[in-house]
Amino acid sequence: MRDFVIVGHIAKTTPDFSLEDLPGTSGRIDVLCRCVNSAFMLSHGIRRDVRCHLILMGGPEPKILRFDGSRLRHLNPDERSTAALIKRALSIDASPSWRESTPGIYIRKGDLRSLLESLRDEGQRLYYLREDGAPLSESVSDGVFVLGDHTGMTGDEEHLLDSMGAETVSIGPLSLHADHCIVIVNWMCDNAALRR
Amino acid sequence: MRDFVIVGHIAKTTPDFSLEDLPGTSGRIDVLCRCVNSAFMLSHGIRRDVRCHLILMGGPEPKILRFDGSRLRHLNPDERSTAALIKRALSIDASPSWRESTPGIYIRKGDLRSLLESLRDEGQRLYYLREDGAPLSESVSDGVFVLGDHTGMTGDEEHLLDSMGAETVSIGPLSLHADHCIVIVNWMCDNAALRR
């Protein structure tokens, strides 16, 4: 399984934002929409073996959205329609357990720690993407890849990742947008899988 | 110089489309907006050594938009604001010569052939991205990279590229969206430049 985790530090946890002005009203949910596109979109379909998790922290109680490629439907490449799916998920009553909003899109209350613990319990290896990490091995084809949004990760989050045994890895010295990093990680993992 | 050329076969050549429904009303200018994002966006600025050309063919007379990183301003990562810049460029009276619409964004009448001839005359090497091409060499850091939109390239366009000496290159066997291909080509070219 290939998992992406993106932390949206100011992303709204309620659906009261405008699809006409995502960057201005949603707490940069546009950034997260582009990450979802990068995680799943292929020319002739979507990646069924990928999950993408968005942690929305711009509210009193953080929420986690899970996009599960194995069941995902109604996903289009444009930002606005993905934002509409997120808006719909945010309109349902979230609990500490996953609830499905539309096919393949789930929401629950929770933070980065609770998500990483559950993914680690599945036996997944954790990777934290940062420019100055060790080069991501060309043999990696799966795992949990954690990325910050446009503001990067906080010191506390980096400490958490470290304490959970996440490996800090880099795909190069240039600082790239999270959605571009996801494209490259998918491509590197595809290549690793092909070489097997 | 690193140039990207994306052919938008149904992209409107007039500004009468809705920013609220780009995929439905613009002839998939949303696809082209994502390509512009991929060509230029870095975490802390934009790529100054890149140009991105969009060929809009969804009208009686095709038009070419040039985004020149060396002068580009007002570019944000979201699709809608890029589409607004394109809309503004399409509202000016285009001639066979470049006219600047907003800083770093130019428009003229013209087709793929006229653009490729002008780029070749600058001494640039032409690469056509296709899944079944020869692997793109890891030493390439510059050149003109030509990509199709969501419909791919026509037989006539492939013949034109061939006749102009374009090398057909591949970045892998999976068929990826044009904007994802641009992210990967930028990354590969960055790596080639770093290795020098």
Image (tube, coloured by chain):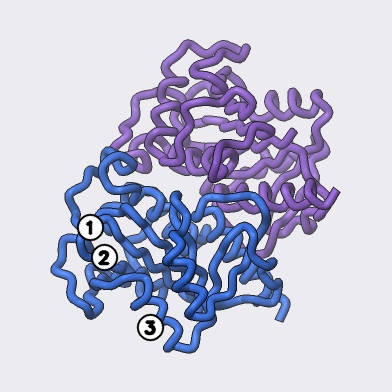
Chain colours: A blue, B purple
Q: Name the residue under label 2.
A: A62
Give me the chain letter of mark 3: A
Give me the chain letter of mark 1: A
Residue B168 coordinates in the image, percent (x, y): 76, 49
Q: Is residue A142 above or below residue B110?
A: below
Question: Do tag 2 and tag 1 residues touch (Cβ < 8 Å)?
Answer: yes
Disc 2 versus disc 1: distance between alpha carbons?
Answer: 6 Å
Disc 1 residue type (three-letter): Gly
| Residue at image coords 47%, 55% | A152
Camera-side residue of B83 and A129: A129
| Residue at image coords 32%, 72% | A104
Side (left or right) of A64 relative to B40: left
Secondary structure of the residue carrying numbered label 2: loop
Decide: few, some or many residues near mark 2? Use Cα within 10 Å; few <14, some 14-19, many ≥20.
some
Q: Name the residue under label 3.
A: A118
Q: Name the residue under label 1.
A: A59
Q: In this view, does A29 lie above or below B83?
A: below
Disc 2 residue type (three-letter): Pro
| Residue at image coords 53%, 60% | A182
Question: Do tag 2 and tag 3 residues touch (Cβ < 8 Å)?
Answer: no
Secondary structure of the residue carrying numbered label 3: helix
Decide: few, some or many residues near mark 3? Use Cα within 10 Å; few <14, some 14-19, many ≥20.
few
